[in-house]
Image (cartoon, rainbow, N blue to C red):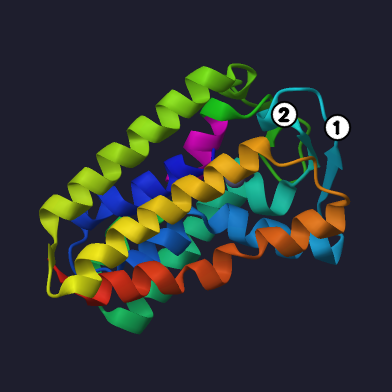
Amino acid sequence: MFIGHFAVAFAAKRAAPRTSLAVTFVAAQFADLLWPIFLLLGWEQVRIAPMGNPFLTLQFTRYPWSHSLEMNVLWAVVFGVVYFAVTRNANGAAIVPLVVMSHWVLDLVTHRPDLPLSPTGLSRAGLGLWNHPAATIIVECAMLAGGVAIYSRVTQSRDRQGRFGLWALVAFLLALYAASLVSPPPPSTTAIGWSALIGWPLTLWPWWVDRHRES
Ligand SMILES: [Zn+2]
């Protein structure tokens, strides 16, 4: 899943009004933020196998550290503890681990059975929504619309940046999604790793938008 993760990040604002949208963005994508790092380090592997369906171009052959269920539970706990240690925001610290876990659950719905349950075991899970591209796009866009609707209802823009920055961010995410569907297969797995690192600097945008809005 791609923009569906951002939908959760936006919607989480309702449950954690004092938590920055940047934090929920990082939490919702956490497995996908670790993945390119682990890929470039050679700890995880992916194969490029173009087959007409853009959602299935990448075969996730090995990603036990970023994407196994057990590791995601661990990342969720670590995320919550670090968040609480830094902010002392108990409400936010209770919500952000759930946002981290939502990543695995949503990936479970979309991926083919390639998600490991534990980092060392052989069991793999995945319900395969990606086998149906039109359904995937409808589900993800509906989720993003719902998430943004919640965020824009529970926050109010302080100024023009808060208003237009939000809509520009949503437009940019949709453009990224569209580009990922129509662009040719990546030239190498190293190129995938480097381009997927965009998730990190992208976090500055929701941080900036959130500063120009109030809960
Ligand atoms: Zn993922």
In the rendered image of this protein, does residue 209 appear above or below residue 61?
Answer: below
Residue under numbered circle 1: 49
Q: Secondary structure at mark 1?
A: loop
Q: Percent from the top left, x then y, of residue 34? A: 64, 61
Whether residues under marks 1 and 2 lie with C-beta atoms below 8 angstroms apart, the answer is: yes
Residue under numbered circle 2: 56
Mark 2 Cα shell of 10 Å, populated few (<14), some (14-19), many (≥20): some
Q: Is residue 31 magenta?
A: no
Question: Which residue does the image show at 33% across and 76% down from the upper left?
Answer: 208
Please name whichever residue, 39 or 184, is drawn nearer the observer in this view of the structure.
184
Query: Which image quadrant: the N terminus?
Result: top right
In the rendered image of this protein, does residue 53 appear above or below residue 205?
Answer: above
Looking at the rendered structure, the kind of residue marked 2 is Leu
Q: Is residue 105 magenta?
A: yes
Please report the bounds of the magenta region as a residue range: 102-108
Q: Determine which of the numbered discs, if any, sits on residue 172 in the image.
A: none
Residue 47: quadrant of the picture: top right
Looking at the rendered structure, the kind of residue marked 1 is Ala
